């Protein structure tokens, strides 16, 4: 019946009746559950929870922003903002016409509680009961944990898959049959040219492409150098102390001794380097690992004098591109080309899985290094080299680096803020650049071995590395914490766990 036939008036919109809400079949979203003024945050939280619970597995495609906005009855800007937050957290990524896709799942965790002494079994994790062995990093990677704050990785979820695929298709389309045969053991000419240009633009190094030797990362660069140096009677390569445990292991497995040289606020102490009598030294001058110290100008001049007496510098430029609060630091190779063997890679720019790096050696060692590379593996695989060269020459790699800097800076800031909140007694080192922070402890925390702290953290589901792993001489207890590969949410939670373990 209609009203003209005496039907009662419609009361559905009477004063005081609830406003209708919008909903979507996608995740059964109901806007009535969203807090007033917090719609974007609520939506991001719902998607994040669905990914963690497995309702949206990696590879799932989210609804188009226009479609979801219409279904929920909100502005498209609200959906765009929620997707932006998920992208910054590393959970989703835009795929152009492929839409927005889930690329990583957040790690769920129980409520954090204060740790008790009884929570940590005597001896802690087997990883930390004795000095680290050659397989310690493999074991640490394999250890189950909810949150991984190990240093050394960039944001792997940000790998530029679309750009890589475009470059790969373009490269394949232009190859001729002979390109699939054995190539130059030094590396493809295209990548050697691209690397020379990249180093000139980004590191101030003037190098001819013929000087570039393409290697399978810094690890192989050290192995080749060890072979050549031992061939000319060098058996000792001094190292900074502290310095990367992994680098020391590579030197020692290759048959070289690695006497320690202390590092202070200006970098390696050249007077102590002279005292070792070692004819070569391995340095990380742009961002010393793990302290983050930048090699000062005075020390650079002292090193130059040391090289004039016959010293050789091996420069590991492992993460110099990742800087946030300071100007770039020139590579030592840029001023001492005849006395510096320079090693770099894309492990911190793209991904360690690519196993692509480069080595620029002094002229006196170049031919021997090419021979060592030839007989090691006949040269790196050519196709990834050509794709990487295309990324470098097209500008895609520099665009990717700018993206990484923004994301890494946000994650670094999240870690520093979490340390201030949960570890107020900790001292933060090396925050201006890189992919990690070093923290040292004072007061009562200094009475506890950092290996014990790392073991307790692992048993609570958080991976960290103790500073003592990277030192040969006694050091204050501390931790080395990576932030680039973890979301801000996981960083805050992981540091909060550490806060329950430090007195």
Image (tube, helix red, strand yellow):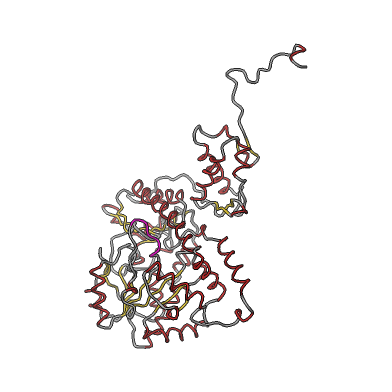
From this view, report whether residue 10 is shown above or below residue 408: above
Q: Quadrant of residue 212?
A: bottom left
Q: Report the side of 235 relative to 380 (left or right).
A: left
At a point 38% along the width and 65% down the height, the residue shown is: 320
Count of marks, rendered view: 0
* Residues drawn in magenta: 320-325
Image coords of residue 432 (percent x, y): 34, 57
Q: Residue furthest top?
A: 6
Image coords of residue 337 (percent x, y): 34, 78
Image coords of residue 347 (percent x, y): 46, 67
Q: Quadrant of residue 447?
A: bottom left
Q: Quadrant of residue 152?
A: bottom left
From this view, report whether residue 134 is shown above or below residue 362: above
Q: Residue furthest bottom?
A: 232
Our reading of the magenta stretch's main secondary structure is loop
Decide whether residue 321 is among the magenta residues: yes
Q: Closer to the camera, 18 or 190?
A: 190
Q: Closer to the camera, 360 or 35?
A: 360
Pick the quarter of the image with the N terminus.
top right
Decide whether residue 158 is among the magenta residues: no
From this view, report whether residue 404 is shown above or below residue 297: above
Q: Closer to the camera, 283 or 250?
A: 283
At a point 62% along the width and 38% down the height, the residue shown is: 70
Q: Report the side of 114 relative to 184 (left or right).
A: left
Image coords of residue 165 (percent x, y): 59, 64
């Amino acid at each position: 019946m209609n009203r003209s036939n005496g039907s009662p008036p419609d009361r559905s919109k009477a004063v005081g009746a609830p406003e209708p809400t919008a909903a979507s079949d996608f995740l059964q979203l109901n806007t009535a559950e969203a807090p007033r003024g917090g719609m974007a945050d609520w939506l991001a939280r719902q998607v994040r929870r669905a990914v963690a619970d497995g309702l949206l597995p990696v590879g799932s495609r989210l609804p188009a922003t226009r479609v979801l906005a219409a279904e929920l009855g909100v502005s498209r800007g609200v959906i765009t903002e929620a997707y932006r937050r998920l992208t910054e957290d590393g959970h989703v990524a835009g795929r152009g016409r492929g839409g927005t896709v889930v690329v990583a799942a957040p790690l769920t965790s129980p409520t954090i509680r204060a740790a008790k002494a009884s929570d940590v079994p005597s001896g802690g994790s087997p990883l930390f009961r004795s000095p680290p062995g050659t397989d310690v990093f493999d074991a640490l990677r394999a250890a189950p944990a909810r949150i991984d704050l190990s240093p050394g990785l960039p944001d792997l979820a940000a790998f530029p898959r679309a750009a890589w695929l475009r470059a790969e298709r373009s490269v394949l389309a232009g190859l001729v049959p002979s390109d699939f045969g054995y190539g130059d053991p030094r590396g493809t000419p295209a990548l050697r040219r691209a690397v020379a240009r990249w180093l000139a633009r980004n590191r101030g190094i003037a190098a001819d492409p013929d000087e570039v030797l393409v290697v399978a990362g810094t690890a192989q660069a050290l192995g080749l150098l060890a072979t050549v140096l031992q061939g000319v009677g060098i058996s000792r390569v001094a190292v900074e102390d502290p310095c990367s445990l992994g680098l020391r292991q590579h030197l020692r497995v290759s048959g070289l001794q690695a006497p320690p040289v202390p590092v202070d606020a200006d970098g390696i102490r050249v007077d102590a380097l002279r005292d070792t009598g070692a004819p070569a030294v391995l340095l990380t001058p742009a961002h010393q690992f793990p302290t983050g110290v930048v090699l000062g100008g005075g020390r650079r001049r002292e090193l130059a004098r040391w090289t004039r007496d016959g010293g050789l510098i091996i420069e590991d430029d492992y993460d110099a591109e990742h800087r946030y609060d300071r100007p770039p630091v020139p590579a030592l190779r840029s001023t001492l080309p005849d006395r510096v063997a320079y090693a770099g890679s894309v492990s911190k720019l793209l991904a360690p899985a690519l196993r692509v790096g480069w080595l620029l050696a002094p002229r006196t060692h170049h031919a021997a290094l090419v021979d060592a590379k030839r007989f090691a593996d006949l040269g790196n695989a050519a196709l990834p080299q050509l794709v990487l060269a295309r990324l470098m020459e097209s500008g895609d790699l520099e665009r990717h680096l700018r993206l990484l800097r923004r994301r890494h800076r946000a994650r670094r800031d999240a870690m520093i803020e979490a340390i201030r909140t949960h570890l107020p007694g900790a001292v933060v080192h090396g925050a201006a650049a890189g992919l990690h922070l070093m923290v040292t402890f004072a007061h009562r925390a200094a009475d506890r071995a950092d290996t014990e702290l790392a073991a307790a953290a692992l048993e609570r589901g958080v991976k960290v590395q103790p500073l003592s792993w990277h030192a040969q001489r006694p050091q204050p207890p501390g931790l080395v914490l990576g932030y680039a590969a973890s979301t801000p949410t996981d960083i805050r939670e992981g540091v909060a766990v550490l806060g329950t373990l430090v007195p």
